[in-house]
Amino acid sequence: MQSSMCAMETRADTYAAGLSKADGTTTVKLLESNPAPPIRGQNDWTLEVLDGSGQPVSGAKITVTPFMPDHGHGTTKPTISEIGGGKYDAAAIYMYMPGLWQVTVDVTMPTGMTTSSVKFNICVD
Ligand SMILES: [Cu+2]
């Protein structure tokens, strides 16, 4: 019998394209995961950064840090590149173990003055 650990994981977000997280006036949207929903293994995410007026933010500095809170470890570092129009590609998000991954997105605004941090809680089987 197949069992899904994630079906029981109440801490996880339900993945949907456009999943949105906010910290203060900054919003980060997970526009798309490839594959969708995210899988155990390699994932590529398209993120969008919006300011307090809902305007896309170009030229932000982004870091993406996956971490397994139950095991106290991370993984390899994703590769970030700016697409334009407030969109950013986070490639090689390598969630190599089944379970809950906290994927933290840290954003430094182009002015360098404002930093924000959001977490996407993703379970992979
Ligand atoms: Cu682990």
Image (cartoon, rainbow, N blue to C red):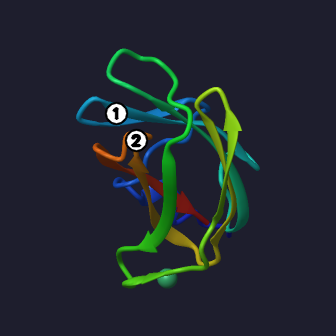
Q: Which mark is residue 109?
A: 2
Q: Residue at x 63, y 43 (%)?
A: 88
- Going from N to C along the chain, the mark reached first, 2 or 1, is 1
Dividing the picture into quadrants, the one containing residue 90 is bottom right
Residue drawn 61% across the image and 32% down it: 17
Report which residue position mark 1 lands on. Answer: 26
Within 8 Å: ligand 1 and the Cβ of disc 2?
no
**Residue 36 at what x, y percent from top left?**
71, 45
Q: Position of residue 101 (x, y in %)?
A: 47, 66
In the rendered view, tell whether residue 99 sits above or below residue 75: above
Q: Are marks 2 and 1 in contact (CB under 8 Å)?
A: yes
Q: Is 99 or 104 nearer to us in this picture?
A: 104
Q: Nearer the viewer, residue 27 or 122?
A: 27
Seen from the viewer's position, the closer of residues 80 and 14 is: 80
Mark 2: give few (<14), some (14-19) or many (20+) Cα within 10 Å.
some
Give the residue type at disc 2.
Met
Secondary structure of the residue carrying numbered label 1: strand
Is the residue 20 above or below the residue 124 in the image? Answer: above
Q: Quadrant of the N terminus?
A: bottom right
- 116 left or right of 47 in image: left
Q: Where residue 37 is drawn, which disc sits there?
A: none
What amino acid type is highlighted by mark number 1?
Thr
Local secondary structure at mark 2? loop
* Residue 74 % position (x, y): 48, 79
- Tell me the quarter of the image containing the C terminus: bottom right
